[in-house]
Amino acid sequence: MAAAVIQTQLLRLLLLAACLVPAVPGDAREIPPPAYQLAAQRAGIPSAVLYAVALQESGIRRHNRLVPWPWSLNVAGEARRFASRAAACADLHQALQETPPTRIDAGLGQINLGYQKRHYRHPCNLLDPYRNLAIAATILREQHTPGDDWLLAIGRYHRPAGGAAAARYRLRVAQHLERMSGSSGLTPIAFRETE
């Protein structure tokens, strides 16, 4: 019971930190919250890349800001958001009864249950925001080729085979990165329709 209370408090702090990050137009930069910075540092990737992917994957509008939402599922193309981890976990179990795991994504980084099974033991583990960020950062690291722009890895995160779907995804995530321009060390690239 005490562990659940501590976990709830930590998650509230994580979400509060995400809401407190400056989002001022003009020269102000949006800085990834500490949990994203830590997960990215551990994986050796830019924190802006991880945060931009989470914004694209699980972002919701809260208090006039787009913030990643930890208790998000995508089941066969249908986005689902929940008020608690327990509610999301219950729906995840139900979804697994009706939908192949390769058609279900979970958590901040929308980790695919079928294709990324090696990263978790229990499906609801993906609803732990810290675990989910660590997995997302690892996948981004795996998809990055040294010397390539991180946007190529971002496209492969969404669709390893590349193509038009990966290119569209890169464009959407690049919009989030623009708000964080200067904080990631990324340089602009010419987007290509195929890889």
Image (spheres, rainbow, N blue to C red):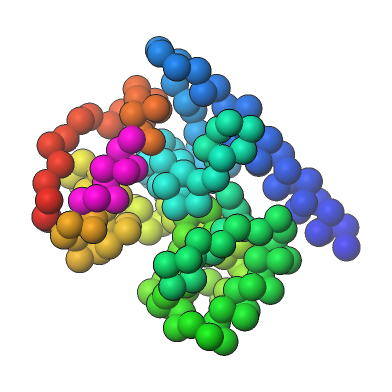
Q: Is residue 95 above or below residue 155?
A: below
- Residue 13: where, in percent of width, then height? 71, 39
Which span of residues is magenta-colored?
Answer: 167-175
135 on left or right of 71: left
| Residue sitting at x 40%, y 13% | 26
Residue 128 appears in the rendering: no
Along the viewing direction, whichever of 157 and 97 lies nearer the viewer: 97
Q: Considering the image in quadrants, where does the N terminus appear?
A: bottom right
For the residue pair 153 and 172, the one nearer the viewer reads as: 172
Question: Could you tell me residue 142's position as x and y percent?
Answer: 31, 58
Name the magenta segment's main secondary structure. helix
Q: Name the residue at the bottom extreme.
A: 97
Q: Is residue 171 magenta?
A: yes
Residue shown at 72% from the left, 58% from the top = 84
Q: Position of residue 158 (x, y in %)?
A: 32, 58
Residue shown at 35% from the left, 53% from the top: 140
Question: Is residue 108 at least partly visible in the picture?
Answer: yes
| Residue 65 position in % (x across, y down) | 55, 33
